[in-house]
Amino acid sequence: MMKVSFGLACSAAILLGAKMFMGSTPAASPYPPELTVSRFAGPDVTPSPACLAVAPTGEVFVGVDMIGSLGKDPGKGRILKLIDKDNDGKIDQHIEFATVDNPRGILVQGNQVFVLHTTFSPETKKATGMALVLFEDKDGDGKADGPPKPLVENLSNTKYIQERGTDHATNGIRMGIDGWIYIAVGDFGFHNATDRSGKKLTMLGGGIIRVRPNGTELEVYTHGTRNVYDVAIDPYMNVFTRENTNDGGGWNVRFSHHLQSGEYGYPVLFQHFTDEIIPALADLGGGSGTGALYMAEPDWPAKFNNVPMMADWGRSMLYIHRVTPDGATFTQKDEEFIELPQITDLDVDGSGRLYLSAWDGAGYSGSPDKGYIVRAVPADWTYQAFPDVTKSGITELAGLLKSASAVARLSASQELIARADKQASDAALAVAMDAQLPLYARVAGIYTYAQAAGEAAIPALVTLTNDADVKEHALRALADRKAWVKDVPAAPFLAGLKDPSPRVQAAAIVGLGRLERTETAGALLETKVPASFKAPVKVAEGPHATPNSAIVLPHLAVRALLALHATDSVVAAINSKNGSLALWALRYMHEPKAVNGLISAYQVAKTEQQKQQIIVTLARLYKKEDVYDASWWWGTRPDSHGPYYKAVKWESSPAIEKFLKSVSLKKGPAGLAYFRDLDARNRLDIPAFAPAKTAVAAVSKEPKVDLEKIKSKKGQVGKSSIEDVLLAVNKLKGDPTKGKALFTTQGCIACHSINKGELMKGPFMGQIGSIMNREQIAESILKPNASISQGFATVMITAKGNKYYQGFVTEETAARVVLRDISGTVTTVKSSDIMSRKEMKTSMMPTGLANALSYDEFASLVTYLSQQKK
């Protein structure tokens, strides 16, 4: 999809677009009465708005994207600068700031405009990847001075952008008060992303990465999300996202709190290895998260302030998430806030004006006639000009750093850093040290001082670690820049491990991992592992979206031990009181000395429980994830069994196999069942542990449905225009019991599942009613080709032996692709046999399946589907 369908995989119904406003304001306002919402710019100026950002002073930068999520032709994108000269909520002037293709994220700081977008070759017209670039407007004419400066290149998988478009690629950008640019990476991942210093980084799958504004120090922040599209960052550097899980498996939205270095598990750990991940805070059902913002502006009503605001394109809704501290993380409660058809993005300026962009049914490839921008302000709002910080003195900037406005604090922070002098850094330090100030101001002071003073900030930051109110942030700032951690003492972090605050402990653990002092491994190993650290029951899906604050600290400790490469210390702790954490960490240490250490520890282990944990760890190490070279992607319907997607053996695999077999033989036939389960869970494929052969049970076949015969019949629906059918459906209540029967007789069951326990086929219909209204469901049935659901597009495969297969992908692993055709026939094709693979532009769902129905029957089918809200 895009920041719309932008890679956030929705059902076909979602992709048709909400029509609640039909492009104009409805009679009954969908907006909270505490707000005044007005149309700011229409499709004549801002068609297909994929993303937006607002300067602190109020200029709105909109990314127009006429390529869309699945388009592949360049020359259709631009960044527009919109100006409201009289501050009445309507555009007075627009300027084409720059031309870029597939704009996916914008960030404005002074005369600098950062843009994340797809890059194309001028010669071949084919996509060459994605890049974060910097435009500047030093002469103030509203236009970029010249070509952009590339900051990070190769930020997505070029092969799949060329084949599919930018639907699962890299997306939103936002700056934290720590001065890093945080980048949301879809599960295309990237290979050899290169920053301005020449540093290269590869990431299999999605997550969050970050980079300095000058394009250096590129690093992974978190990993293991699917299609995160944007990030919301609060004043205390808590990062929140609204991402989702799997095409065709429900498209469920997850709301997550991202802790630095955390692993969130998609796609190989989040179902069956949930003991190893940080779970999301909530599974919110079907949807498609897009833009995100943490609102912290003093002019806003308290009930709508200091909250993450998360756009959901699929639900055409801006949500508020009420977050409550829970140890080092949070719990949440979400609520609907502002309706907007296919909302894509949002941002706020220094005067409290919130701007939101609506895709409004512009489709996969954009539309010149759809899409608009609205402005929302509190009902009692009055305009107050935001100062030009470049003309402000140090005292005024220090005052803004203390402001209750997050926009003001960030703007002042960046200007103080840009001044690059001792007076500016001293002003920031004074704010950091002032215990009478609100915490948000002191935190802004700490991060500003750390950036402005660089290595010289270390002594003052160490002093601040003795202040209980700001200790967490002093620790974070000390370890934030790898370039000067060599001079940072470990003592404050070791003390932080014993602090009563879980947030301080988390900062200390992450910091020790970043300091890379192997001598601190012993202290990290003392982190307690809770009882909740346990694998899901066999073949069951684990609690991947249930808050578990107790798991956060040991999880981060494991990640820190890996960053330290502390194999020796971890092996030495296997049979100690810290053995549980040591064995957890060893699951990821694919080194011969780790394997040898485990085997030796087994020989001297004193309890059966210890021995069993060692066996589990060795089984986990038997294979590893293949090196990612960007030549493949797991698709929209990946195999999520885990623990690896493209598993390969490595040099210690034979030693592990020999050991496991020897232990199995000693345990005799009674113990073989355990090793067979172990083999199945970890997909070891060791012949000695192969399942026992049993008589093949009769396989129940699904009834074959002749869809061609169904669609050839002409009833009341088939003889009427779509408009007349929709009008009729709106007037008829429908009988859901009759609709349930029609779901089978009209062939829906051939390609859709209703219950989660059923085999997942095409788009899951078990919660379609929570995503769409009756009219949208009806239209998706009548016009299936209007917008094709990801995971349900027709795929044509050419295989060795001059064989051809057509269908939609129901499962994909590194070794095979499983297709289901329109009759319900399932075919498995070996990946090694595939010569070519092409996604067609037509839906597998034929037009006309409802033709034979009466209006009442069709209304009954629609009503039945609208009640599916599992």
Image (cartoon, rainbow, N blue to C red):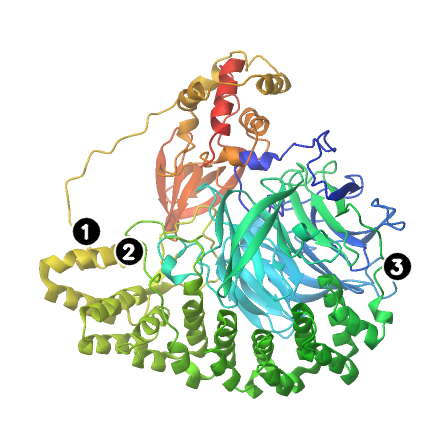
- Mark 2 or 1: in front is 2
Residue 64 showing in the rendered view: no
- How many numbered marks appear? 3
Q: Tell me: residue 215, above or below residue 427.
A: above
Q: Amino acid at mark 2?
A: Arg
Q: Write down the quadrant of residue 655 in the picture.
A: bottom left
> Secondary structure under badge 3?
loop
> Secondary structure under badge 1?
loop
- Position of residue 129 in the picture relative to residue 703 (left or right): right
Q: Write down the quadrant of residue 312 in the picture.
A: top right
Q: Amino acid at mark 1?
A: Pro
Q: Amino acid at mark 3?
A: Asp
Q: Tell me: residue 724, above or below residue 574.
A: above
Sequence-wise, which precedes: disc 2 or disc 1? 2
Nearer to the camera, 588 or 388:
388
**Residue 197: image x %, image y %?**
63, 75
- Position of residue 245 in the picture relative to residue 358 (left or right): left
- Position of residue 752 in the picture relative to residue 219 (left or right): left
Which residue is under mark 3? 141
- CA gap between label 2 and label 3 equals 62 Å
Answer yes or no: do the residues labelled 2 and 1 have beta carbons within 8 Å? no
Q: Which residue occupies 68% across, 71% down?
A: 444
> Secondary structure under badge 2?
helix
Which residue is under mark 2? 681
* Quadrant of image for the N terminus: top right
